[in-house]
Each structure stands twice: as C-alpha cells, then as structure tokens.
Image (spheres, rainbow, N blue to C red):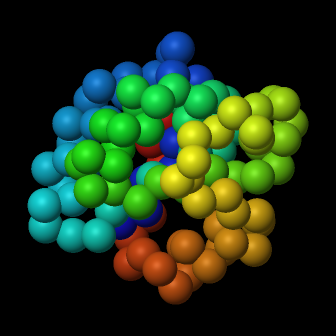
Amino acid sequence: MLIILNKSPFVGDYASLLDITRRMAQEEKVGVLHIHDSCIALTSEEYFKRLVDAGLKVYALKADCEARGILKKVKKGVKIVDYKGWVKLVMEEYDRTVSWT
C-alpha cells in the first residue's frame, strides 16, 4: 500500500498515521509518499527514524521539496522521486493507494 501525505506535520495527525502504518507494515509492503507541505516532516530526524523503524519505505516528491527550499534538508535515506517516479510507485510498486489528508 502506498500512502500519500499532503498536509504539514503541524496540522496533520501524524501520530495516528504512524500507528496505523506500523500495524499495516507487519502484513504488507507499505510506503509513504510525501507531497506538498508534508515534505516538511522529512527534515525531522525523529519522524524519519520512526517511519524507518516501522519498516516503511519513505518517498518525497522532488518538486515539492524544491518549492519549499528544503531538498537539501530532507534526511538521508528518503527516496526522492519526480512525477514520473510517482506514477511508477502507483502503477508498478504498490497494489493500493491511500491519500491521507
């Protein structure tokens, strides 16, 4: 399952997201794609570590990181994808997609 986040970590319910995805990752492959303001969360070492420790694949949309001036601040280990990469995630890598707003 690919979960697509778009809200800032300052307004989104990231605690619930982490709880749900941690449980899901025990049974299936789960990735989290950060777009729009959710990319800001990927500058936090604590947040990134919690995703990785839960067994999740972590992605960020390059254009949105660049637009916010944070591309160089995104934690190492986050896979940066372009729009073509996003389509590949949806069409080839994951069987389901959920938008978390």
**In the image, farthest residue toward the front:** 76
Place of residue 64 in the rendered image (x, y in percent of width and height, measured from the top left): 77, 43
Q: Is residue 86 visible?
A: yes
Query: Which residue corresponds to the image point at 35% horizontal and 44% vertical from the top-left?
Result: 51
Place of residue 33 in the rendered image (x, y in percent of width and height, measured from the top left): 54, 53
Query: Which residue corresponds to the image point at 76% horizontal and 32% vertical from the top-left?
Result: 70
**Quarter assignment of residue 98:** bottom left
**In the image, farthest residue toward the bottom:** 92
Relative horizontal placement of residue 28, taking residue 68 as reference (left or right)? left
Relative horizontal placement of residue 101, taking residue 83 as reference (left or right)? left
Q: Is residue 82 above or below residue 21?
A: below
Q: How many marks?
A: 0
Q: Is residue 6 visible?
A: no
Quarter of the image for the N terminus: give it: bottom left
Place of residue 36 in the rendered image (x, y in percent of width and height, measured from the top left): 69, 38
Query: Which residue corresponds to the image point at 56% horizontal and 36% vertical from the top-left?
Result: 42
**In the image, farthest residue toward the top:** 10
Place of residue 91 in the rendered image (x, y in percent of width and height, measured from the top left): 55, 81
Relative horizontal placement of residue 33, taking residue 30 as reference (left or right)? right
**Quarter assignment of residue 29:** bottom left
* Front-lying residue, 20 or 75: 75
Relative horizontal placement of residue 33, taking residue 14 as reference (left or right)? right
Query: Which residue corresponds to the image point at 34% horizontal and 56% vertical from the top-left?
Result: 56
